[in-house]
Image (spheres, rainbow, N blue to C red):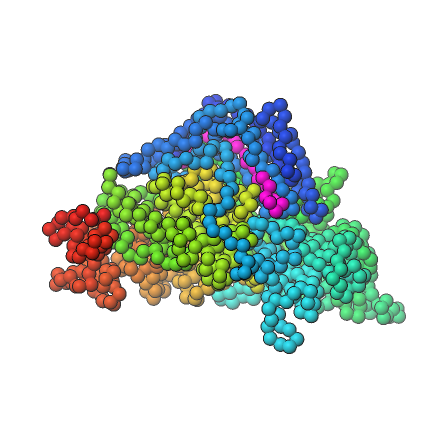
Amino acid sequence: MSSSNGQEHYGSIILEEAPSSPVNGVQYLKDDDYEEQATTLILQTSSRSISAGTSDMQYQQQLWADQNGHDNNRRFSVVHTIRHNITSFMAEDDPDGRKSKRNRCMAILVGVGATLLVLSLAYVVSGGFGASVQSADSGDTTGNDGGTGTGTSNSTVVIPGDAGSHPSHVPVPPGQKRKAAKPPLATTNREGVDPLTDIIDTSLFDSVPKPFPTGAFWTNFAMMPPAVSNKEGGNTAPPSYDDMHNRVISYPVAALPYAMRWGFMEGLQISYPSFHRKIEPKVVSDVFYPDMTMTVAEGIAKREIPSHDLLSATLRFYTNSADDSSYAASPTAASTMDVYIVQGSPYVTTKYTGSTPMVTPLSIYSEFGAIGAGGNMDTDGACNDLAVQGITGSQWQIKMTGTQFVLGQPEGLTWLLMASDSITLSLDCASKRSLKATQKFTGVLRLAVLPPGCTISGSAAKQLMAHSSVYPTGGNVITKYKAGQSTSQSDLAEVQFSYTIDGATSGNSTTELLMLSLPHLTPILENEALDFTNFDGEYKCIKGKMTPVRGNILSFTEKLTSFGFTNKHRITDTNVLNLLKQTVARDLRLNPPTAEDSYGFGKEICRLANLALIASEVAEVDDDDLLDQALEMMKKYLKPWLDGTNKDALLYDSAFGGIITTLGLYNKMADFGNGRYNDHHFHYGYFAYACAVVGKFDASFVEQYGDVIDAIVADVANDDAHSPYFPIARHKSWYDGHSWASGLFPQGNGKSQESSSEAVNCYYGVYLWSIVRGDQYMNYFARLLLATEIRGARTYWQTGPDSDAYPSEFAENYMVGNLGGLDVNSLTWFGDKVYYVHGIQMIPITAITEELLRSDYVSKEYKNIIAPVYDNVEVSWKGFFVCDLAIIDPSQAWINAQDLLSAYLDVGLSSSQIYYWIATRPGVDPAAIDAEISAGGKNTDKSCMMNTGCAPLGLVGDCCPTPEGNYLGCCTKASSCDVNPGCASLNLGGDCCPTGKGVFLGCCT
């Protein structure tokens, strides 16, 4: 499939054999029950369709290269598939033996007459651009319905996850992906309101890539620069880049271990920011200093970003046609400097074509020499030697010829500069600052900081020099999925960072890339890690130690969750079930989801979705009244958002490719920056979760709104590399191991994210929606996004004295509030109270919270941080910490929960959720809970604060009734006509459901 703007994407699928044991409630046939047929799928960068041989299941193998002339060739191995003709069925789980009037526990048979897509999906994902691509599944060549294949059979789409209770509406046909469709929303091109040209510098692209990767690590390079001070004083709007009186330069991009900025006058500024670290009790900052600057002596006439993908971005500088450094707006394509910004590379790689390299330090060079050439590397000594010889003036220069150089700075950093071909560099002795080639150069320079404390003769320097001849120019993320062979084995995602390489790879060369791994990845990385003997130095970044590894492909495996909609631990205690029926009925009357902003509404509708799930679990046979009530409320409040009739209607933004809110479009700060792509996964994750819950029980809702919800989901978790509407997984940074919440706002710390738990909730919600939708591709992809987000949260947000990521004095905060590319703090955007920091990393409380918050972490965090401040925690936040305590002490948490009233909790939480969470914790003592229930706890039905009529009056104590048995006039009882929609519409007063005589009127629902 080719997008209209010529943007290039890659994607393919691998199908492998099915397991012989039941997995997640799915029974597969044994190996000898199906026939295997091999298929090769080829991707290509032209508009030609995939060619066929003698059989529709055999395709010619093809290799290709980009045709964009940007020297960023992409090589892909042919992806093989195994197609299975297999029949199986998926039976729903019904552990309690309960049936509902929806037959929720019937077996679901879906997708007949197509190929079974099972077990293993391989996804080659790239966000690059420059050429179109023909999708391997865009033609009728796979033998599926409508194709030309000869083999057909009855088969079932197998969806890992919750096997129970979702409706039997038709899912995606087996073996196929859901085709990208234009989002069924009103469309805006932003013009006249908040145009694209006010946000990014469009001159940096031949054509602005669409969809634009708004969450990519490198977006600061593309942002319009911040305001600068002009000569008359004061701040001005961002000037034109042609106005060279203002030294316009971007905010930094964190491509760890380095950070970089670029500008016309400056070229590329490079910082090793961890060397300039500032540590405070609540904040650690890796400060950007331009330790080195790489540019061209001719001066820069034009800049552009010719390519990018999920792991890299390429910058290009065109030099002036005039052969001097004065500014001239006359670029020449024959003279350029390309910079390959690849995350995790210990080198800064620049490719010069017919231009003169120039490398400038922060202050001066204290050392300069060609490695192996001998001589005095001390610049003072070398320059003094020349002066003694009478060499002065313009000839007073140190000249060195070679391919490996050492550059020392008085600030304490030592750099290695390695060239692909012999080059002569000249250092001006007058300034000890101007280092440039003596003539134009065509070749590659690689600059690498030598980890502090290392020497030129050490193993780190030797490794850096040995691996410098090969370099990455880009990278792809390839994923392959495998199902567990039994219910006790997890489904797996095998992930590869596959780099496009260039350099000295001819002949018998076996040199591999030298890359750096982050702390979250190192324990599971399959590549060889270099120990201290082989690499006697340590690279650091804001996330901690970076481990040197070898390999052109970095491989690791993630276990995928088997959680469904609800907690794995079912409630069987009759007392608890009865209590939950009461609290759910009460909580459904409180806090209706009426917020007008997308985030506030998302939290509120998520609360209601959790009440619906609890209602479904506590419902008796053929008694779904609570569930029906919750679902009807959810649909009532969701429909305006899905129909686009609410005040803050969702819009499809055709300029960038994404879904934004109306208020966010007209005010860039509204909805937390939604209009400029901040926090989309926080907002829309709540929508996905809630819609999945409704869809679990109501097929008609999915039929009516499925396409709209698909679009909302795709905005944050698009799994289709061919989509012309949305980028791949908008917020996910694959190398960083987590999402960045920030969108198209320039940030001094590169990118940032606050709530790791809301990011987890997003991908959990998408996963649940994939179960409802019957979409295997989305299912596996969402669970991979979820697994990596949880791993990232555990590594970089959940800290403690044993943390490998942060300095001990900071790690003792036990929780990160905001993580940036160049800084980390234990604060929040909305305040610095310690419980804000911890609470924002817990919301919302859902089934997946069990995987996010581990008992070994919580036991230390609660004891050291939460327990000492619990009594002073604002009531709205206390519910989250009761849930936190329940992970390690559910009995005490139950006691604490008696003091909580839903009306005063956060809008995303209710007493019912807290009770349900506690009662489903592993190790909970039913006897202790029963004792509390039998003792009566606190009768919150009587409480003034729990009554929606009395609470606004500020009354305290018991109102409904009072201790004397009287009902105050403000009381609205569950039986009241006022609180029953059917009766309230008839303007009936008093008690209706039931009346004082115990009769339920016909208006009762």
209 to 65, vertically: above or below: below
In the rendered structure, the answer to whether residue 466 lies left or right of residue 515 reads right
Position of residue 30 relative to residue 874, above or below, is above
Answer whether residue 778 is magenta in the image: no
Tell me residue 576's x, y (percent). 25, 48
Q: On the picture, is 551 further left or further right than 743?
A: right
Closer to the camera, 881 or 234? Answer: 234
**x 32%, y 63%: residue:** 875
Outermost residue on the right side: it is 390
Residue 991 in the image: x percent, y percent? 16, 54
The magenta-colored residue range is 1-24
Image quadrant in which you'd find residue 326? bottom right
- Residue 5 lies within the magenta run: yes
Left or right: 579 in relation to 523: left
The spot of residue 639 in percent (x, y) is: 37, 49
Regarding residue 655, the answer to whether it shows in the image is yes
- Residue at (30, 43) in percent of width and height: 616
Report the residue at 70% width, 41% height from top.
510
